[in-house]
Amino acid sequence: MNRTIILDFDNSVDSIENALRVDLASWQAAIRFGCSKKNFRQLAIKLQQDLPTSYGTVMLGSGDYHHISLLLIQRLQNIYNAQHPLEVVIFDNHPDNMRYLFGIHCGSWVSYVARLPFVSHVHVLGITSNDIGFSHAWENRLSPLIKNKLTYWSMDVNTRWANTIGLGRAFKNFTTPDDLINGFLTYQISRSQPVYLSIDKDALDEETIQTNWDQGRLKTDHILKTISSLGERIIASDITGDVSNWQHPSRFKRLLSILDKQPSIPTNTLELWQAQQHQVNLQLLSALQAN
C-alpha cells in the first residue's frame, strides 16, 4: 500500500499513520490562495525532489492550496498521454475555473487541468456557489466548456444563461445531493478511463464539517459512494479543505481573502473543527485505500 503524503503548508492536517509529511511551511506566504507562475514552477521542482516515485493520497491542507492538484496531475503525464487519457473528478463547492490574471489561484486551476492533452474530461461535482450563475458568467473561463472538456454538476444555481450561448450540455443541474451523485454515477457506468480524484471538503455541508470557505450540500456518504463506485479506476487522489488561520503578508491577498469572506477562527473553535476534519480525512483515506 502506497504511503499517504501530507504536504504540510499550514499544519492543518493531523497525524496519519505511516504518512510521509513534507515540510512546506516556508512556502506558505508565496503559494497560499494564489501565486505567480514562477513560484508555482519552483514548487513543482521542490515536489519533484521531495516526493517518492509512487505514493498514495496526497493531503493538501486548506482549500487555499487546491491549485497544487494541478502539479500532482501534471506528474502523471509520463504515465498517461493523449492515447491513454484519464478523467479528473473533483468534489468542490466552486468551479475553480475562474479568471485570475496574476498567476494561478486556488479558484482558477481547473482550466489548466482541462488543457492537459492526457486529460479527456474534468467533472466538478457538488457546486452550489453562484460562481457559475449569470452574475459571474464573465469570470468563468469558457474555453474548456466550449471544447467539451469540463462539466459542472450543481444544485441551487440558476445556470439558464449557459443554454442561451450553447453551453447547456456542460451544466448539469439537480435538486438534491442524491440526484446529483446518482446522475453522475449513472453517466460513469459506460466509462472505463482511469480517474484522478480530487476532494475539496467544502463540497460537504456545514452539519458534516466546517471549512474556511462557503460550503455545499453533500454528505460524506456521497463521496464514499462515489469512491466505491469508481473503484479501481481511481489511480491517484488528493484531499483538501482542511482549516487553518493565516494572515497574508501581502495586502493584495488579504483583500482577496476578505472579498471571499474567509473568517478568522477562534483557537478553541479551530481545534474542534480540525478534530472533525481529521475524522472525515480518516474515513476518506480508508475508502481510497480499499480500492
Image (cartoon, grey):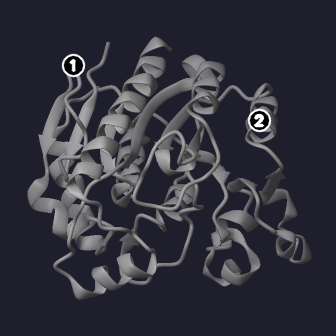
* Residue 178: mark: 2
Residue at 53% x, 26% y: name it: 234
Secondary structure at numbered mark 2: helix
Q: Amino acid at mark 1?
A: Glu
Is 27 situated above or below 165?
A: above
Q: Nearer the viewer, mark 2 or mark 1?
A: 2
Is 194 situated above or below 289?
A: below
| Residue 250 shown left or right of residue 170 in the figure | left
Residue 105 in percent (x, y) is at 40, 69
Q: Amino acid at mark 2?
A: Asp
Query: Dot 1, crowdedness within 10 Å: few (<14), some or many (≥20)?
Result: few
Secondary structure at numbered mark 1: loop
Residue 271 in percent (x, y) is at 24, 44
Residue 98 in percent (x, y) is at 55, 73
Residue at 49% x, 41% y: name it: 199
* Residue 17: mark: 1
Which residue is more in the foreground, 126 or 66? 126
Quarter of the rendering containing residue 183? top right
Which residue is more in the foreground, 6 or 255? 255
* Residue 167: mark: none
Instruction: Report the Cα–Cα distance between label 2 and label 1.
Output: 32 Å
| Residue 253 shown left or right of residue 77 in the figure | left
Pointer 2 or 1: first along the chain: 1
Query: Dot 2, crowdedness within 10 Å: few (<14), some or many (≥20)?
Result: some
Residue at 32% x, 12% y: name it: 1
Residue 135 in percent (x, y) is at 71, 83
| Residue 66 shown left or right of residue 181 in the figure | left
Residue at 23% x, 50% y: name it: 268
Quarter of the rendering containing residue 275? top left
